[in-house]
């Protein structure tokens, strides 16, 4: 991948300059062990007396459980335990749990609501024995008609005691009778993208002498998972300890609650350690996907292309259980117009329950689906007016101080016009060369059947936005402790590094504040004070902020006696390059000398300003802490006879607040763009009557290195958000939100076809 960035090339790695503080790009703390293959993951764990777990899953998307007979499984030699919902503490539906709403049973009791739902589990001496025994469990089902069409869910019989409607959120602002001179309409569909993590779900449960259990998992929310697991097992939270192992990929939540509780239950039942590693097919069944969506839009504009009114209907398929559908719907509604101003907005949005695979948290949930729709609408508007796609966006671009349709003022930097200008000023990639040795550059790849004369180039633009941290009144808080002894420091913070590089950032923060040479990041477990989940790019803000505050408190402890000795205030002392210096240059002392024989520590919290729920009648309210913006230009080559599409180049302009680690920012943008390109052209977990058809890495198409385009960074705008620690903003979700819309716009430009669904199929790009 290539990169042409406007950031200070002054962000070299520490192996080039020795710089490790904020604004530099030191090597990630986990880079070397991962490259050497010695980084510890849950699948690598072992314990004395280990048993293996396996799960029996429903072959039906909707059925009533008539009976469960475990006798054949118990008779298999080497089987140590078989558990069902009857072995869990009594609940309204078999010890229910869930990330936000407790509506999902750990093991199905009475009814199954999606294909692959866990029904029973086995512990045995060998993994093959466990799987054979699980297959021997006899379950009698009364198969029920599945509800797989989210539009039909409104009138279908209830699939759950809570009903089929997970949330309805209307948005009303402005004059409902307003009309524009130009009106464009569109119907848009977004498919079911799976996170497809590089490492499948795995874990180890070890029973404790006090009757509790210790879980070793790649959890992204250790305290939340601990509390929910304890509740499902009928234990006090302090009887469950969760130790976070290496996270092998997490652009969504990792191990679901059923996996954790079942694993713990087997360990408690047998009194021995139990390990479970899911197959890839099971992994597709076990974790949530992106919400499929159906979106109907009508845009009104004046003769100059300025938006007058936006009307929309948004329908999210939440699958069998609530998960985070209410949160996703709030983002979809609040960002339904995108980073544009419009005085009149009327939206109705619903999230519904079906018998499809459960949908959950995945980069830019809610915001991605609406970004595809509103950007497609702006392309329609530009075409009808004969205006350049960039210009139509400039005319409507939001800026700092403008309101969202929810009435919340955008008080953070919102340099939408500057991002568009950066894209417009960035050079375009060269046209394909008529070179026989470069035929892999054509759509279809090496040896493709296409005719080069049928290839058309298209250029598309898109701008999007995402919120950071939790929303609608969620209490966002994190705690960190910094200890310093000699010339090294230790950071204790339960913020899981799920790939976003938090461990490296924490090291940079402490080195910048204290000037110490060595910083150790303690492993994460639930005995530490909570830092909350690794989601919505929150750890850079709240956990990074907590680390900074704790480090500043230690800094004050370290400098106070020195300042007193020299008769000056602490504020007149600075730390740079491992040296303490006074404002007048009289004092110059190594940090290691100031810390000699001393042990200092401090604990601090970071909690951003509160938010409020959106009004259930009007959708109004200050629901978000802050917002991040990204603009993107995609260049594609389309074979208009075959419908083959190759993404040639993606150029990104993003506002980052402050670039704390430029190289990590570039890496995160590249990964997010690749994920967005996957949804645009390839990724869709297809189902038939609620049963996944391609739940494997051979059937579910992921982008390879040849599918991933050159990714260039035109600009990383640094306009600090004054309420954010360090002034920094999220970087991963926004490019993932925008990339599918940009690729669709480019295919639309190449073919002249409407392109109303993701992923884009070959028939969507063929000119008859």
Image: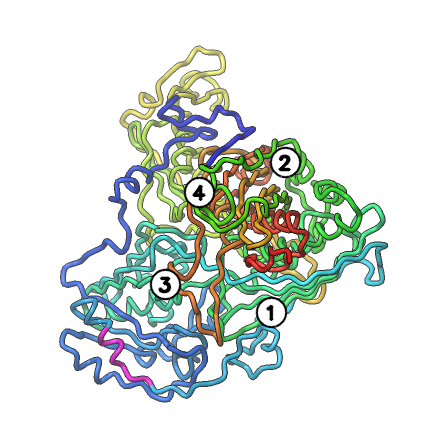
Question: In this image, 297 relative to 252: left or right?
Answer: right
Q: Which image quadrant is residue 590 in?
A: top left
- Marks 4/2: CA distance? 41 Å
**Mark 3 or mark 4, earlier in chain:** 3
Task: Tell me where the magenta segment starts and ends, as one range.
Answer: 132-139
Q: Looking at the image, can residue 170 be seen? A: no
Helix, strand or loop status at disc 3: helix
Foreground mark, 2 or 1, reads 2
Viewer-proximal residue among 340 and 240: 340
Q: Is residue 754 magenta?
A: no
Q: Which residue is mark 4?
A: 604
Q: Position of residue 420 (x, y in %)?
A: 66, 38
Mark nearer the N terminus (2 vs 1): 1
Secondary structure of the residue carrying tag 2 is helix
Residue 138 among magenta residues: yes
Can you identify the residue that label 1 sits on? 167
């Amino acid at each position: 991948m290539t990169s042409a960035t406007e950031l200070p090339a002054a962000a070299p790695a520490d192996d080039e300059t020795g710089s490790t503080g904020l604004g530099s790009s030191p090597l990630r703390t986990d880079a070397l062990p991962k490259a050497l293959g010695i980084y510890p993951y849950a699948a690598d764990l072992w314990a004395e007396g280990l048993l293996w777990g396996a799960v029996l899953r429903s072959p039906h998307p909707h059925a009533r459980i008539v009976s469960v007979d475990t006798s054949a499984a118990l008779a298999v030699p080497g089987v140590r335990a078989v558990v069902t919902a009857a072995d869990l503490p009594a609940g309204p539906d078999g010890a229910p749990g869930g990330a936000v709403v407790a509506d999902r049973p750990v093991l199905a009791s009475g009814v199954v609501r999606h294909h692959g739902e866990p029904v029973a589990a086995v512990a045995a001496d060998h993994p093959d024995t466990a799987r054979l025994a699980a297959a021997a469990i006899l379950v009698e089902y009364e198969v029920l008609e599945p509800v797989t069409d989210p539009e039909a869910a409104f009138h279908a019989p209830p699939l759950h005691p809570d009903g089929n409607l997970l949330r309805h959120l209307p948005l009303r602002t402005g004059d409902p009778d307003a009309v524009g001179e130009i009106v464009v309409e569109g119907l848009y569909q977004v498919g079911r993208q799976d996170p497809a993590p590089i490492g499948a779900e795995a874990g180890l449960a070890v029973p404790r002498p006090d009757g509790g259990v210790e879980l070793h998992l790649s959890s992204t929310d250790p305290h939340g998972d601990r509390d929910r697991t304890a509740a499902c097992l009928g234990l006090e939270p302090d009887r469950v300890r969760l130790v976070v192992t290496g996270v092998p990929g997490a652009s969504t939540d990792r191990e679901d609650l059923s996996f954790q509780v079942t694993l713990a239950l087997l360990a408690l039942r047998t009194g021995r350690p139990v390990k479970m590693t899911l197959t890839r097919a099971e992994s597709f069944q076990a974790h949530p996907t992106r919400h499929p969506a159906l979106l109907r839009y009508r845009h009104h504009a004046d003769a100059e292309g300025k938006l007058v009114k936006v009307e929309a209907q948004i329908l999210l398929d939440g699958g069998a259980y609530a998960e985070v559908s209410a949160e996703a719907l709030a983002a979809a509604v609040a960002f339904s117009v995108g980073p544009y101003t419009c005085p009149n907005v009327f939206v109705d949005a619903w999230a519904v329950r079906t018998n499809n695979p459960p949908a959950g948290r995945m980069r830019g949930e809610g915001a991605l689906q609406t970004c595809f729709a509103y950007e497609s609408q702006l392309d329609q508007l530009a075409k009808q007016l004969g205006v350049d796609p960039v210009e139509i966006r400039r005319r409507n671009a939001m800026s700092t101080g403008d309101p969202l349709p929810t009435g919340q003022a955008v008080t953070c930097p919102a340099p939408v016009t500057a991002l568009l200008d950066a894209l417009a000023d960035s050079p375009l990639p060269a046209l394909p060369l008529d070179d026989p040795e470069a035929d892999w550059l054509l759509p279809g790849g090496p040896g493709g059947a296409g005719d080069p004369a049928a290839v058309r180039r298209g250029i598309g633009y898109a701008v999007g936005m995402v919120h950071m941290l939790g929303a609608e009144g969620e209490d966002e808080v994190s705690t960190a402790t910094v200890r310093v002894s000699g010339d090294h420091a230790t950071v204790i913070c339960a913020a899981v590094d799920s790939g976003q590089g938090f461990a490296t950032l924490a090291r940079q923060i402490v080195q910048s504040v204290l000037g110490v040479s060595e910083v150790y990041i303690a492993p994460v477990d639930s005995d530490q004070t909570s830092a909350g989940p690794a989601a919505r790019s929150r750890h850079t803000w709240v956990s990074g902020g907590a680390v900074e505050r704790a480090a500043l408190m230690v800094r004050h402890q370290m400098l106070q006696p020195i300042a007193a000795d020299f008769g000056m205030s602490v504020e007149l002392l600075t730390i740079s390059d491992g040296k303490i210096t006074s404002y007048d240059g009289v004092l110059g002392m190594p940090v290691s000398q100031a810390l000699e024989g001393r042990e200092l520590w401090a604990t601090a919290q970071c909690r951003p300003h509160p938010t409020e729920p959106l009004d259930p009648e009007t959708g109004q309210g200050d629901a978000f802490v802050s917002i991040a913006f990204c603009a993107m230009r995609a260049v594609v080559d389309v074979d208009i006879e075959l419908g083959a599409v190759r993404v040639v180049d993606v150029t990104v302009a993003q506002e980052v607040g402050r670039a704390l680690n430029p190289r990590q920012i570039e890496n995160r943008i590249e990964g997010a763009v690749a994920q967005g390109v996957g949804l645009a052209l390839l990724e869709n977990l297809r189902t038939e009557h609620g049963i996944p058809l391609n739940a494997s890495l051979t059937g579910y198409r992921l982008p390879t290195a040849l599918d991933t385009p050159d990714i260039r960074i035109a600009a990383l705008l640094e306009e600090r958000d004054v309420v954010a620690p360090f002034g920094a903003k999220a970087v991963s979700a926004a490019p993932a939100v925008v990339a599918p819309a940009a690729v669709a716009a480019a295919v639309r430009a190449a073919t002249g076809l409407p392109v109303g669904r993701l992923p884009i199929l070959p028939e969507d790009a063929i000119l008859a």
